[in-house]
Amino acid sequence: MLTRASILTVLMSVVLFGCSQSGNPVSSSGSQGNVIMSVAFTNSSTPVGLSKVSSVTSADSIRIDSAIVVLAKIRFESNIDTVEVDTSSSVPFINIDRADSSATFWGPFVIHIHDTVAINFANKTLPPGTYTGIKFAVYRLGRGEGFEDSEHFNHPNRNPSDTAITNYSIAVWGSIYKNGTWVPFAFKDDQNLEFKVKGTFTISSATSAINIALNFNMGSWFMNPFNGSILDPTDMSFRNQMMIREAIQHSFENGRCGRWEDFRDWGF
């Protein structure tokens, strides 16, 4: 796992880079900058903790030990307010057409989450310009489908394994504290979802390496978005499971994208 020092070394190049569009948003010499994509999942201001050790002894607390999220079609947009996304509870099919745009990280990317440190998972050259947001998909990984693995990106000698996420877009492992003890759980979601997040910044044609990061609050995944109560992932009732899926959707809808230095203002 990358140390915070090494993360900062890579992410300081975040300065100047942004979110893109279907074409080159500026008229320039045509030179391109190399973009490193990162994602960070925080757990701010909630009783849902992303950690392996917890001192919580009160009822109704959740500890997330690890998670996997599959992202795809990460598209940089120059005018995010005009971009439309499918807001239905689950998109039936998400087409990955790699010939469609030079300003898209296609994936799918299998992101392994163990803590709140930003995770580098892809890099690509993109056109320079000013961007105002990113459109992306939380993507259900098909059986036998090829993918890029975040742990392979950080550690090239590792072998990707998709057995835990095949046919799903999100998997979470952890424990809920109830009745005086920690009860383990495994939650999996098979939805295809589309989202857009805002963040204004510029890609300079003179820049050689820049990091753009997505940030989402994982702490809200098991929190009722309407009253703030804990949602028990071991409760397999249809209503409760649908409420957790809705909470996860709210988390991604409220995400942010931007430069690493901006995380200071995001509660990272």
Image (tube, rainbow, N blue to C red):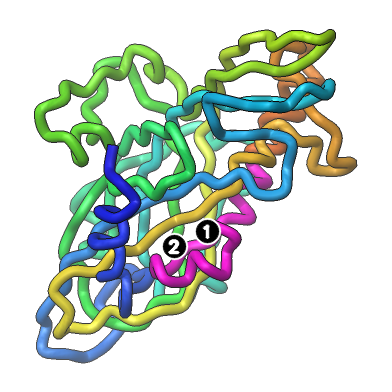
Residue shown at 39%/77% (left/top)? 131
Type of amino acid under label 1: Lys
In the depicted structure, whether residue 18 falls above or below residue 98: below
Name the spot of residue 226 as percent of width and height, x first: 86, 43
Q: Is residue 117 magenta?
A: no
Q: Is residue 190 visible?
A: no
- Between marks 1 and 2, how big is the CA–CA gap? 6 Å
Q: Is residue 41 above or below residue 66?
A: below
Q: What SS does tag 1 mark?
A: strand
Q: Position of residue 266 (x, y in %)?
A: 57, 64
**Circles 1 and 2: CB atoms closer than 8 Å:** yes
- Residue at position x 19%, y 33% in the image: 152
Neighbour tally class for label 2: few under 14, some 14-19, many 20 plus, Cα within 10 Å = many
Residue 262 sits inside the magenta stretch: yes
Q: Residue at x 42, y 18 (%)?
A: 167
Query: Which of 107/247 is in front?
Result: 247
Q: Which residue is mark 2?
A: 134
In this rendering, position of residue 113 left or right of residue 188: left
Circle 2: residue type: Ile
Q: Which residue is mark 1?
A: 196
241 with respect to 25 (left or right) = right
Q: Which residues are magenta?
A: 249-268
Residue 50's spot in the image, x, y percent? 56, 34
Q: Quadrant of residue 146?
A: top left
